[in-house]
Amino acid sequence: MVMTDRSYNLAVVHDDLMQAGGAEKVVAVMHDLYRDAPIYTAIYDPRSTLRAFADADVRTSYLQKSPLSNRRLHKFAFASYPVAFEQFDFSGYDVVLSSSSRFAKGVITPPETCHICYCHTPARFVWRHHEYLSRSAMTRLLAPFMRNVLSRLRTWDVASSLGVDYFIANSNNVASRIRKYYRRDPAAVIYPPIETRLYRPAPPDEVGQHFLIVSRLVGYKRIDLAIEACNRLRLPLRIVGGGPEENTLRRLAGPTVSFLGRLPDAQVADEYARCKALIFPGEEDFGMTPLECMASGRPVVGFGRGGALETIVDGQTGLFFAEQTVDSLASALMEIQTLSVLPEVLQAHAARFDVASFREQLSNFVAWAVEDHRSHMRGGLADESHEFRFHGNDPASQYGRRNRPTL
């Protein structure tokens, strides 16, 4: 049952609205759940993100008016994002709900304001910078300068985590990073929402022999592995999505690889339903596309690390490959063709992550956190009767009371 007590003013905060990825889908559900809440963000481009925000009260930072607000240039503004978020004024709000994979959690809130951060991950480019600085000739050239900037951002990232009253992790994988980098025990793990109603299996005679990628075309997604494995095996591969690595990947692709670009949601659902299997070759924080594919009745071949361990059941809803190598992935692509899966089993698994479950868990958690925060502000001490407990599909989702940072 969703708790709907709205005796508080709430604001949503997100890093930027410049793409239509999984984090933006989470914010879209937050917007639908808290319709009156404004959305604060660094930069907003309605042409590049989800149409769900068209009716939202979106409030942007000073970066919106800078040349770096251009969708091709906005990532170069990363060093200015901390200041942009610190300048927002949240006086008068009872609750700030931040959706953060980079900087949104760095907002400064009054003591009486309850700050809940839904953390998609501690900033990957800050904490896993070795992967980013070795990616291209340009980043290698800038590496000496970038290391200094990233060192300062790591310090800011840890310091800004102290302003969060309650962390929600989007997976157990991310929860472990929050504990490692911020020395905080997340108050909850709530998986991102999957709109399972948008996906349906295709008739068996319409399922093809081709594999599928649905992804932003960026380096850490490791689309190159899928292309090279399909080149070697001469297997058909269809790639949905766009991004900065597209030209590089096109040069790598053989004759069996097709690039479809960005597609409307209905066409993406159709691609899921008709593929042999989805390939999920990167190490992700969570990863929503495997579950969208399962909701369409098709299995997934995924790299056996990170968030995929929480969504793919090896041998039942798909297969893992153990190493990020062409050999390892190619072996899994051959094996998946002999795996017998029932669409209804895949659908039932995906249904555990449905948007309705996310809405209920998030709403209940916010209501609990507000009351817990008010108790602390009144000088009360939480006891066992004031713990938050979620009784849902995931037996691991048992959340204790608020944890202070341990330094």
Image (tube, rainbow, N blue to C red):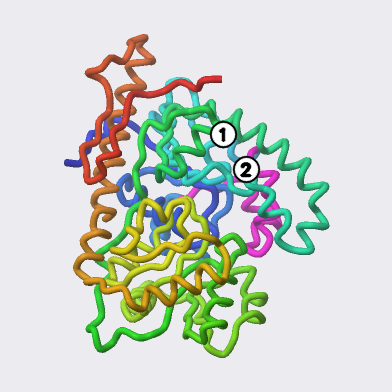
Instruction: Tell me where residue 327 appears, x and y as whole percent.
Output: 55, 71
Locate the C terminus and report the quarter of the image it occupies: top right
Locate the N terminus and report the quarter of the image it occupies: top left
Q: Is residue 127 magenta?
A: no
Residue 324, quarter of the rendered image: bottom right
Specify whether 185 is left or right of 104: left
Q: What's the amino acid at mark 1?
A: Tyr
Specify whether 174 is left or right of 231: left
Instruction: Tell me where residue 300 appears, x and y as whole percent.
Output: 38, 68
Provide the residue designation for mark 2.
127
In the rendered picture of this protein, how many numbered marks are placed on residues? Answer: 2
Provide the residue designation for mark 1.
181
Residue 167, quarter of the rendered image: top left
**Whether residue 362 is visible:** yes
320 and 205: which is toward the camera: 320
Q: Which residues are magenta?
A: 58-82
Q: Earlier in the sequence, mark 2 or mark 1?
A: 2
**Circles 2, 1 touching at the beta carbon (< 8 Å):** yes
In this rendering, is residue 17 above or below 251? above
56 and 390: which is toward the camera: 390
Instruction: Tell me where residue 158 appears, x and y as whole percent.
Output: 60, 31
Specify whether 333 is left or right of 188: right
Disc 2 secondary structure class: helix
